[in-house]
Amino acid sequence: MRILTVSDFNIALAAEALKSGLLVAFPTETVYGLGADGFNPTALARVFEVKNRPRFDPLIIHIARVEGLELAADLDLLEKESRQKTGLLCENLWPGPLTLILPKKREVPELATAGLATVAVRLPDHPAAQKLIALSTGAVAAPSANPFGRLSPTRADHVRDQLGDRVDLILDGGRTRVGVESTVLDMTGPSPRILRPGGVPQERIEALIGPVESPPGQGGPVSAPGQLKSHYAPRTPLTLHHPEEMAALTYEAGTGCLFFRGASRDRWLRYIPGAGPFPGIRVLSEEGNTSEAAANLFDILHQLDRLGLSRIRAEEAPLFGLGPAINDRLRKAAAREPSED
Ligand code: TXA
Ligand code: MG
């Protein structure tokens, strides 16, 4: 496996690698993706193998410009109203962290969509990703570049540490900006439905196209395979706590605390005897900003996971902006069975 810094030359090299069937991890604005040529079934099969991902969990096809949508999706199969809403979303929120579930074109291999009649498409808001996709076949299938069920990568070294030589090439574009995966929005039903909360808040989508159905809460039906309860999990067991509960925790050595905002940590520290240091105490955003918190989430979880803690206690994020996406990831991390690995 080679790690190459993002440059025009290295992007061109990576595009050639994709075209010859190799797997290339690359940065997007959300998390790093494990890219394969979207039309090459052999390369697609390797993606599932490398991630140890069940074949029933379909991939997102990444395109380089809005017109590229035609490579993967057939908008003529949508009802008129859904088609209009899809147009509005593409115009206003692409490029960006929004994945649309649309009727699939026949040319997209069954393997990419896990045999479904629909396909997930997204136009990432990242110059290197766009160039890479444009220089290859224009349709790059890319799940997050982590082993199935593990923490998503927001830096090139997260990919290296988790996938190692199982990936052929890593394009290093530094830290990703958004930090949580794209919002997955299903446009094929009677009304649009969020299958996974992510980088575009529900409020922004609704401001454009009116009400959308929200993701099922904890324990709801598994509508997108990404809604599997145990996902994005650190190795360390994690429990999720309401802010009031978090403030009342007693200090336990060997336990990590992940506060949403600085004020929560300060309130808690007032009741803790001694001055620390407390190595496992972290904050997602000092000011309590949900975008900043999302950008820090996976990196901090990766760091906490390396400390050998017996447990991580995490504070719930508020229910606006990227808060629901953060809570979704934390809830899935908490749902992990201790015996799973
Ligand atoms: O931000 C992101 O979306 C990142 C970057 C790399 O683009 N990608 C990503 O891919 O998170 P992945 O494979 O980890 O998650 C894709 C999600 C899964 O939950 C999958 O089940 C869902 O999208 N999905 C894909 N195709 C679908 C379809 N046809 N119907 C319903 N859900 C689908
Ligand atoms: Mg993933």
Image (spheres, grey):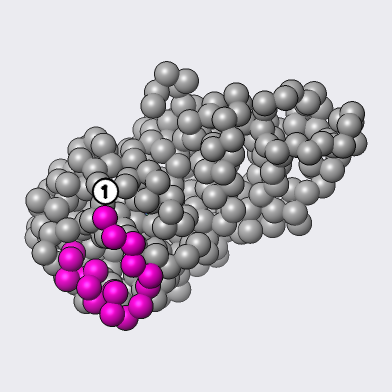
> Outermost residue, top direction?
339
Determine which quarter of the picture holds residue 75.
bottom left
Which span is picked out in magenta? 1-18
Name the residue located 70 percent from the left edge and 38 percent from the top edge.
279
Q: Nearer the viewer, residue 93 or 75?
A: 93
Query: For the stretch drawn in magenta, what is the main secondary structure?
Result: helix
Q: Where 11 falls versus 119 (above or below)?
A: below
Name the residue located 32 percent from the left edge and 45 percent from the top edge.
163
Quadrant placement of the N terminus = bottom left
Name the residue located 17 percent from the left edge and 58 percent from the top edge.
22
How far from the left and from the top, in percent, is residue 26?
34, 62
Determine which quarter of the picture holds residue 307.
top right
Q: Where 265 falls versus 159 (above or below)?
A: above
- Kindly identify which residue carries mark 1: 165
Q: Nearer the viewer, residue 76 or 301?
A: 301
**Residue 2 included in the magenta stretch of the image:** yes
**Residue 279 included in the magenta stretch of the image:** no
Q: Nearer the viewer, residue 162 or 88?
A: 162
